[in-house]
Amino acid sequence: MSDPYATREAVHEQVTAGFGTVRVLPLEPHADAGVLHAWVSEERAVFWGMTGLTRDQVAEIYAHMDTLDTHHAFLVLKDGAPAGLLQTYEPTADRVGECYDVRPGDIGLHLLLAPPGPGGARTGWTASLLDAVTSYALRGPDRRRIVVDPDVRNEKAIARFLRQGFEAGETVVLPEIDLPDVYLPEKRARLAFLRREAAFPEDA
């Protein structure tokens, strides 16, 4: 069976001993819509804000994002299989930028992981994927810090980021956004930050 992702050039590839190879590919909104729709439709993805949308609506949202210079979406593969959806953005062009003191070199990150495969998620699976995507986000020459803004009710995500070395920030209220392609209601979020020198002391 041919690899549907073979023709895409990865923006980041990371091999972790005992885990496997993680590749970060530019998202193709319509080609990847089936996979994304299956993920965002699950109850566990309620904080992603797309439950109830059709496959075409999900595709159109990411097609719109593909036209932006400030927001980008990626498909994360683990050993060739879809494992997560990564979004990065410039905080100054996002609603989170209205809620904290943005610094030069900040980059925003959203990550939705695929559901566990047969037998459930293995120990270290989430941490290894998160390590790969944070490595990609912070290795840019001008990047100094990642900001994430999980919903305060999403205790699992908050705990996951803190275990990964993120520093807890303040609780803020993100304003609602009403655009032709997407509506995002007001959200109470818990900010967290990962500094490049904390993730990669050798770069300090």
Image: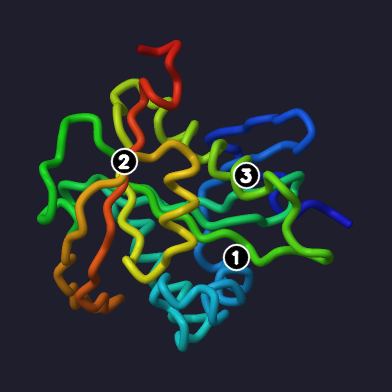
Q: Say whether residue 120 is left or right of residue 193.
A: right
Q: Residue at x 17, y 60 (%)?
A: 172
- Asked whether residue 200 appears in the rendered view, the answer is yes
Residue 154 lies, in percent from the top left, at 41, 67
Residue at the image point whose x is 13% and y is 48% from the top: 100
Q: Position of residue 49 (x, y in %)?
A: 39, 76
Closer to the observer: label 2 or label 1?
Answer: 2
Q: Give the quadrant of the N terminus.
A: bottom right
Residue name at image x 65 percent, y 55 percent: 83
Residue 86 coordinates in the image, percent (x, y) = 48, 52
Which mark, residue 193? 2
Amino acid type, residue under disc 2 in the picture: Phe
Q: Residues within 10 Å of mark 1 (few under 14, many from 20)?
A: few
At label 3, counting other C-alpha atoms closer than 10 Å, the crowd grade (few under 14, some 14-19, many 20 or more) is few
Residues at marks 1 and 3, CA–CA distance in whole angstroms? 12 Å
- Rendered view: 61 above or below 23: below
Nearer to me, 55 or 90: 90
Query: In which quarter of the view is residue 150 placed?
Result: bottom left
In front of the other: 190 or 100: 190
Label 2 residue SS:
strand
Q: Could you tell me which quadrant the C terminus lies in?
A: top left
Query: Earlier along the polypeptide chain: callout 3 or callout 2?
Result: 3
Q: Is residue 10 above or below residue 112?
A: above
Q: Which residue is denoted by mark 1 in the rendering?
A: 31
Disc 3 designates what residue? 8
Q: Is residue 28 above or below residue 14?
A: below
